Image: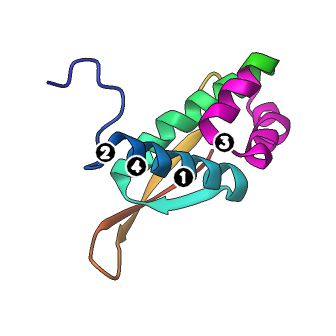
Amino acid sequence: MRHRRKVPKLSMEKSRREAVLRNQARDLILHGKVDTTPARAKATQRLVERLVTWAKRGDQASRRRAFSVLQDKEATTKLFEEIAPRYKDRAGGYTRVLKLGPRRGDGAEMARLMWV
């Protein structure tokens, strides 16, 4: 049953799914966009929205919490010093998902996760 399930399983075991979402969130923070499948983009979007909300608080507990998710000092610093101030007046919806079309190799649908 799916009662109170927060993230789709994405056909992966928990540790692999967490690693994929962590890496995509880190890449979005560092590079500004991520090209992936729509399901992964939506799952990553939820994680990144939560991270930005923590970063907007700006306290030490939020920084440690974000670092525990990202496990990357450079990404955490950029999140708190560059990205969070940009969205200080915005209540939510920091990212958008754009559909790109099929991937050339296997025809899978692709989407781009990017900042608003």
**Residue with the most extreme right position:** 81
Q: In this view, does 48 lie to the left or right of 57?
A: left
Q: Can residue 7 be seen in this view?
A: yes
Q: Quadrant of the N terminus?
A: top left
| Residue at image mark 3 | 71
Where residue 103 is drawn, which disc sits there? none
For marks 2 and 4, give the CA distance.
6 Å
Secondary structure of the residue carrying tag 4 is: helix
Q: Which amino acid does label 1 sit on?
A: Gln
| Residue at image mark 1 | 24
Q: Which residue is drawn at 27% across and 75% down?
A: 107
Query: Does the magenta segment cover residue 39?
Result: no
Magenta-tinted stretch? 62-88
Q: What residue type is labelled 2?
A: Glu
Q: Which of 107 and 63 is in front in this view?
A: 63
Secondary structure of the residue carrying tag 2 is: loop
Q: Which residue is drawn at 71% across and 54% down?
A: 30
Q: Which of 76 and 14 is in front in this view?
A: 14
Q: Position of residue 78 (x, y in %)?
A: 80, 44
For marks 4 and 1, give the CA distance.
12 Å
Q: Where is residue 15 in the image (x, y as percent from the top left)?
A: 41, 43
Q: Quadrant of the C terminus?
A: top right
Disc 2 + disc 1, Cβ < 8 Å: no
Where residue 13 is drawn, which disc sits there? 2
Q: Which of marks 2 and 1 is nearer the N terminus?
A: 2
Q: Is the magenta stretch mostly helix, strand or loop?
A: helix
Find residue 51 and report its image quarter: top right
For marks 1 and 3, give the CA distance.
12 Å
Q: Which amino acid does label 3 sit on?
A: Gln
So how many labels did they put on this image? 4
| Residue at image mark 4 | 16
